[in-house]
Image (tube, grey):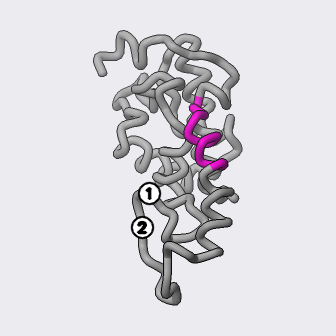
Amino acid sequence: MITQKMKYALKALMELATEHAGAGEPLRIEEIAQRSGAPKRFLEHILLELRNAGFIASLRGRHGGYVLIKSPNEIPLSELMRLIDGPIAPLACLSRRAYQRCEDCKDEQNCRLREVFGQVFWSYLLLVDSLTLADLVGTSASSAPAAGLGL
């Protein structure tokens, strides 16, 4: 299950991707909040995380705002999910990036929970790893990111 924070992040990125495919003009946070239905104050924190991760840029000035700096088809949903919500594995012992051995597990190799949830998780992971932001906006948006903005 994805969190509300993740939903807001995806909706904001979808708005930026739609703008990216059109005129490519920066969107102010107020516009993003209104279009996506995300509370502005909460959105500020989300956009900061996305900027720090290198998915978007913020431009200052009268015509400033936020823009995508990667093409939507170069932004994997699995990376966004890990950035916003943390590890996506159902068990810590299945996580690629945040692996931790279960404290109560005596034999990880023969753990039935790990085996069954691992099969489900790997199937899920194959699907999620194949999806990008472009899949959410219904385009193969392959145009150059932030063209002409000096980014």
Task: Locate residue 65 relative to residue 120 in the image: left or right.
Answer: left
Give the structural element (helix, strand or loop) at label 2: loop
**Alpha carbon distance from label 2 to label 1:** 6 Å
**Magenta stretch in the rendered image:** 123-133
Give the quarter of the figure containing the N terminus: bottom right
Give the quarter of the figure containing the C terminus: top left
Q: Is residue 24 magenta?
A: no
Q: Nearer the viewer, residue 66 or 55?
A: 55
Classed neighbour count for the residue bearing mark 1: other residues with Cα under 10 Å, few (<14), some (14–19), many (≥20): few
- Above-or-below relation of 106 to 55: below
Q: Position of residue 96 (x, y in %)?
A: 44, 57
Q: Residue at x 41, y 48 (%)?
A: 48
Give the structural element (helix, strand or loop) at label 1: loop
Q: Residue furthest front?
A: 110
Q: Badge 1 is on which residue?
A: 96
Q: Position of residue 40 (x, y in %)?
A: 58, 49
Classed neighbour count for the residue bearing mark 2: other residues with Cα under 10 Å, few (<14), some (14–19), many (≥20): few
